[in-house]
Amino acid sequence: MPTIVTDINELDLSGTYTYADYLLWHFKERVELIKGKIFKMSPAPSTRHQQISAKLHLRIGGYFENHYCQAFFAPFDVRLPRKDQNVADQKIYTVVQPDLCVICDEAKLDERGCLGAPDLIVEVLSPGNSNTEMHNKFELYQESGVREYWLVEPSQNAVLVYVLDKTGKYVGLQPAVESVQSSIFPELKIDLEKIFN
């Protein structure tokens, strides 16, 4: 019978883990699993992070209210199989919890969250997670086929938008400072002054 882990210190942080392992972790620390490696998340996001995230969720969630796509916010597990991996394969090595995500393919949703790439992911940067978001997750989301990725930079009051091109690579758009508009959902346009103030 699998053993429940209640203390993160019981784990080998340099080890490689799967989603099956992740389901047995019942400790206080919030973690994500990226390509089998454990990444600790900030203990609790800052008030500003939460305010920005909540305002974005209200606007994005409102836009998708009468739409076939659905918006979700953290904590919400997104399991990303390797590009060459069958999604039915239980050995998933990546589980992330984006601040916000939009999923249009209902078949990707189950009682545990999302299995496969969301169409849109929004991550709000915090001082402690900037490196992970900017580097590891950028590559991960690109490789997994997330069609559009927004990086919200609270210290700059800006949103960096990346759109997947036909070759499977992200193309960065001009930083959004007044309003941000989705490329894949052109009618989704958000006034950033209302988000950052």
Image (tube, grey):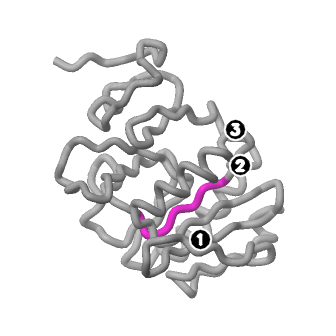
The secondary structure that most of the magenta stretch takes on is strand
Q: Is residue 48 shown in magenta?
A: no
Q: Observer-nearest residue: 104 or 148?
A: 148
Real-space Cα separation, disc 1 to disc 3, in angstroms? 22 Å
| 148 with respect to 55 (left or right) | left
Disc 1 + disc 3, Cβ < 8 Å? no
| In this picture, residue 106 sits left or right of residue 189 | left
Q: Residue 128, labelled with which disc?
A: 3
Q: Residue at x 43, y 38 (%)?
A: 33
Instruction: Name the quarter where the N terminus is drawn.
Output: top left
Q: What stretch is highlighted in magenta?
A: 118-124
Identified by mark 2, the residue type is His
Packing grade of label 1 (10 A; few <14, some 14-19, many >=20) is many
Please state the horizontal and vertical placement of residue 49, each as a whole percent of the image. Answer: 71, 49
Mark 3 or 2, nearer chain start:
2
Q: Of helix, strand and loop, which one carries label 2?
A: helix
Report the residue marked by disc 2: 49
Query: Looking at the image, is mark 2 or mark 1 nearer the viewer?
Result: 1
Q: Where is residue 171 in the image (x, y as percent from the top left)?
A: 58, 75
Q: What residue lies at 66% left-to-right and 45% top-to-bottom?
A: 131
Q: Residues within 10 Å of mark 2 (few under 14, many from 20)?
A: some
For label 1, the residue is 162
